[in-house]
Amino acid sequence: MSLEIQDLAWGHPQPGGGWRQLFNGFNLSCPTGQFVVVIGSNGSGKSTLLNLVAGTLRAGAGSVRLEGRELVRLPEHRRARSIGRVMQNPLDGTAPGLTIAENLRLAEGRRRSLFSPQALLGLHPSRADRRRYAELLETLGLPLADRLDTPVGQLSGGQRQTISLVMASLGEPRLLLLDEHTAALDPRAEATVMELTDRLVARLGTTALMVTHSLEQALRHGDRLLMLQEGRLIGDWSAAERHQFSPASLRELYGNATVQTDPPSIG
Amino acid sequence: MLAIWIGAIDQGLAYAGLALGVYLTLRVLNFADITVDGSFALGGGSAALLLSENVAPPLALLVAVALGALAGTATGLIHTRLGVNDLFAGILTTTGLYSITLRLMGRSNIPLTDLQLALDRLPDLGWGSDGRWLLALLLVVAGLVGLLALGLATDLGLALRAIGNNAVMARSNGISTRRGLTLGIAAGNGLVALAGALVAMYQGFADVTMGIGSLILGLGAVIVGESVLRPRTVPQALVAVVLGSVLFRAMIALALQLGMEPVDLKLATALLLLLALGLGRLRIPGVSEPGGGR
């Protein structure tokens, strides 16, 4: 298995007092190269799950293994050396004051320690870097190859998100985490980013977890569909099984899952 | 008359390390670092102490840089490991540094009247000792700008710039923001301490209070330089900051020429900075926010 989550537990204090245990003994196994789409209502734990895998949140208990390597005790930046990530907000995934080439260079060097000899020697992005990035962007059909020196802050939200996606794919990631990465985009940019997502996941052959609220995306993309409710898996369908759903029937199921009983509360 | 302007340029160059240090922490790392007030005096005081004990000037400068970097490391660790707000972390270190500098110096003021710096080995530009200082400082500052420009173009430099731009993105690309911030703040304060040492050597004494208002002076240099050159690249920004330091000193010289009392200089400096802040030219993390905050 590429990604193995076992007995994951995580909770948080509630504003009015008490404790909400969102995940309690959560398990998930994903084979290498599987593109998993995760849906669920707000508060179901989709983004929290991604944050627990990425290390933005620390699990209370349990194990998260990526290709056999335990991640739970590693800080976020160490986990990021093998995890590519695209966030919901296009502003979060890139450094706006740095150019496209500089952002790509940072992502490409994700496996490098800050104080490694390679990080201290050589000026980057070099000509060779820039040639490589221009080729990559052209190969992916992105009309940004001639704008490598443009600060990313000057790009549109959709363009920033495509750069963020390309960045996540650099540096040989073992896992891609896509957290509602088209939620802030207009339909045209969303289609472009999703088309690029499919191509990059296929090209890398890496495991991917994509969280989305779009049921159309959930039915069209990925090899497996998961539905979360209150930190529990209430649906797990392969691509073939997923075809039983029409957008309307999935919406109905999704709607039923959204109508919740009171969240489990302790204390 | 010319001597006044050459002297102003000399002072601007001597203070350039301060401006570059403030640029590194504030602009590159997005970290408002008040430690500079303490590390400037620490650099000046420690260098003056060593020079008064006949230690070779290059070694005295190196020790000053190392002590400044140590002060910056303290602020970095307080901020990143203990989670103390950036401004407060700097205030804590600066407060402690006052006693440390005074302990190091053994007294509040060290004169350097008999200092031999071998500046006469440099060619005479016809402007006497000020001209030789100009050459020496130009060499030092050019070296600093070159080193910084190269350093910020490496992967490590790129990582530091990413931390200041978007720490969330930096972490998600494998960069340790804790270590990066600490390293950057240490480097910034090393530069500031070097400026303190150079200023002490240039003016012929070090005083334990010489660091008061250093942050404002550094900010002033950054603002003036950026306003004049409007830099688009890192090397341009570094040159702009040095130019800003010289222009800032020239403005002070001009103010004195126009009859301003030296006692009013700090007020004039603060008002200039306030004007720049009000015009929205400068955004200081934790101090000023877009749209005026609330």
Image (cartoon, coloured by chain):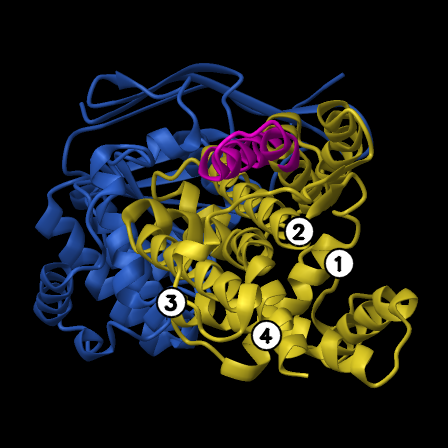
- Numbered circle sitting on residue B135: none
Q: Which one is in front, B158 or B16? A: B16
Q: Which residues are magenta?
A: B48-74
Whether residue B100 is in magenta: the answer is: no
- Whether discs 3 and 2 lie on one chain: the answer is yes
Instruction: Assess whether mark 1 and mark 2 are in contact (beta carbons under 8 angstroms).
Output: yes
Q: Are marks 4 and 1 on the same chain?
A: yes
Q: Mark 4 packing: few (<14 Cα in 10 Å), some, or many (20+)?
A: some
Residue placed under numbered mark 2 in the picture: B32
Does residue B288 appear to the left or right of B181 in the view shown?
Answer: right
Q: Colour of chain B?
A: yellow
| Disc ID at residue B287 | 1
Amino acid at dot 3: Pro
The residue under label 3 is B235
Vertical comparison of B243 with B177: above or below: below
Q: Give the main secondary structure, helix, strand or loop, of the magenta stretch.
A: helix
- Does any portion of residue A60 appear in the rendered image? yes
User: Label 2 marks which chain's residue?
Assistant: B
Q: Which residue is mark 4?
A: B6
